[in-house]
Amino acid sequence: MSTIKEVAAVANVSVATVSRVLNNKGYVNEETRKKVLLAIEKLNYVPNEVARSLFKKQSKTIALIVPDIKNPFFPEVARAIEDVMSSQEYTLILCNSDGNVEKEIMYLDVMKQKYVDGIIIVTSTLTPKHIESRDIPIVALDRPISSDLPSVSVNNYEGAKQAVQYLKTIGCKKIAHIRGPHAISNADERYKGYLEEVGHEPWFHPDLVVDGNYHVEQTTEAATRLLLINPDIDGIFAGNDYMAVGVLKAARKLGIRVPDDLSLIGFDGIQLSQLTSPEITTMAQPIYELGSTAAELLLKLIEGKTVERFDYQFEVSLMKGQSTRALGVIPFGK
Amino acid sequence: MSTIKEVAAVANVSVATVSRVLNNKGYVNEETRKKVLLAIEKLNYVPNEVARSLFKKQSKTIALIVPDIKNPFFPEVARAIEDVMSSQEYTLILCNSDGNVEKEIMYLDVMKQKYVDGIIIVTSTLTPKHIESRDIPIVALDRPISSDLPSVSVNNYEGAKQAVQYLKTIGCKKIAHIRGPHAISNADERYKGYLEEVGHEPWFHPDLVVDGNYHVEQTTEAATRLLLINPDIDGIFAGNDYMAVGVLKAARKLGIRVPDDLSLIGFDGIQLSQLTSPEITTMAQPIYELGSTAAELLLKLIEGKTVERFDYQFEVSLMKGQSTRALGVIPFGK
DNA sequence: TTGAAAGCGCTAACAA
DNA sequence: TTGTTAGCGCTTTCAA
């Protein structure tokens, strides 16, 4: 790999001149520019980004910290983020925290050491203190950290209400909820939305809410128990699509037909929801847009531009699959 | 962020001494070391990795180039790679190439510019020439580039044969194959394995092989047509689990019962194969091990260690799900 | 055992 | 319009 010095030597100019043509900055004679370009071509020269970073104190690199890239929600946002980043010549570092504070902090510090220009993080455990003390642009994704920190998420509460309303609309008379982890804000919001819609129904009972913990296996077990104890449940709102899959498995095992006997609605709109049979009706987040918005917001923060908004909250939309009864269709045998 | 200079000033020593204690290199008096450590503590100092990189010509960073992180196979390897990398204090850059040569080359060059220490790549289009001219440690994952370039993959041919043999074992009399893209080596190998097993059967016909192109929708359509034209097909070997999902959707649409009427086997063993109902029987790759092996191999290459092996080829193993008939069970109505 | 100083490859004052 | 030079923060020779 050749250096700017070598280019300068070949072109018979100073390194400053080479730097000028490289960055299109400052005056440089057209003749000279050509000479330099020729030398660059000849030596197959590309500037050393590390040296540039050292001087400029920025690396054209950002980090994405997620709990686990294997969770199918995250590859979708990661792809969106990488798309906008690479279009701006930025590079994306991927980190898996397992939702573990120590790992999150470790990554934060390592990234800072590497002069990473900014960070997008999905966390339920980090506090504003952790962030502010590190003074590096950060945007929270999926789960806001605090109201005065940049974040991109969806209206989980409203979305959950709409999900349950839809189940009511199609005629469900007893609706259960498989909820996500108590420590995660979006799971709480969705739970609250559910409660708001059904808490005052005569049939409502707290036992209709069970923990799925965002896991398929745990959900399958929990849903199996739930459906065994309450055979009259005819609607389930799963806290996310991943858990909805678990419900589907439980139903199949028990011989309960979806949607004939049981209507199921999920949340997220990840690709997986469209891969099951039946396809899962879900409250879809604009996942790609979440990622790209977070990326663009971070970019603005990095470039010191004033941002008009700090917290973006998108709405979710009903995506009808085959896991819910069609409107007005009376199920067999009822 | 404080610098080594400031630490030196506070500790009242030279920067060289600070560097020595930082790196545990060269002689340094126990007293002096303590002074320095104290200063470091006091200033909350962490060394600047970029400056280090510039000097050492290495960045403790590697890149992973995959076609698309949204393809559920890749998050699983990415996680494995990141696990071993982060345990060695390396950082992982993620790139999506969409299987596009131009993008692959672009990323290769950008990574080189960033002093990335090595690259793990999943590609069907890059040639040895592209790699060698860039002289940077590279290991090919999932798809070997050439026999003399480091690679980690599985025995696709053998795996495919075993898949088809299993379908025969459980009594399938007419077995079709949904194959992956023609340009991808592993899809070809799996196709060859299938052919080897059934090419000479009296019932075999080239039309039993259709293109799924590693896409769910395309597979659903192709499988629908296939099953409509050949209602006597009782076994399908899908080129990967992703496409097997498509077959499942087609079967459901047509009212064909899996596994009662049709036995289905996939390839890969991604998590998705266990999320469908029925769960898909598949030839499972040791995905995590593939990733971690690639990572370890790359690390050795980076550190200039001699490697005993350049091409790792793992075996796949049958993972029984519910998409294939149980051995010896005669299906209803036959 | 320690420090001075050169240098990694680049950018940007400043001077010419 | 161009060149000289200091400096980004670090490591490592070399000399003391």
Image (spheres, coloured by chain):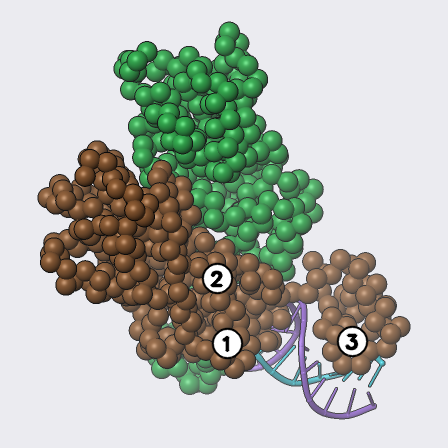
Chain colours: A green, B brown, C cyan, D purple
How far apart are labels 2 and 1 at the CA level? 18 Å
**Which residue is under mark 3?**
B17
> Which chain is home to disc 1?
B
On the same chain, marks 2 and 3? The answer is: yes
Is any atom of residue A11 visible in this view?
yes
Quadrant of the image for the C terminus of chain B?
Answer: top left
> Which chain is home to disc 2?
B
Amino acid on which disc 3 is placed: Thr
**Which residue is under mark 1?**
B301
Is any atom of residue B71 visible in this view?
no
Amino acid on which disc 1 is placed: Leu
Task: Place residue B60 in its image quadrant.
Answer: bottom right
How far apart are labels 3 and 1 at the CA level? 32 Å
How far apart are labels 2 and 3 at the CA level? 43 Å
Between A150 and B164, the residue placed more toward the observer is B164
**Which residue is under mark 2?**
B289
Residue A282: x and y, percent?
A: 38, 29
Q: Residue at x 16, y 62 (%)?
A: B199
Is residue B328 depicted above or below A90 in this figure? above
Q: Residue at x 35, y 39 (%)?
A: B278
Q: Residue B323, which numbered label?
A: none
> Which chain is home to disc 3?
B
Task: Place residue B51 in its image quadrant.
Answer: bottom right
Which secondary structure, mark 2?
A: helix
Is residue B216 depicted above or below A308 in this figure? below
On the same chain, marks 2 and 1? The answer is: yes
- Direction from residue A14 to residue B160 in the image, left or right: left
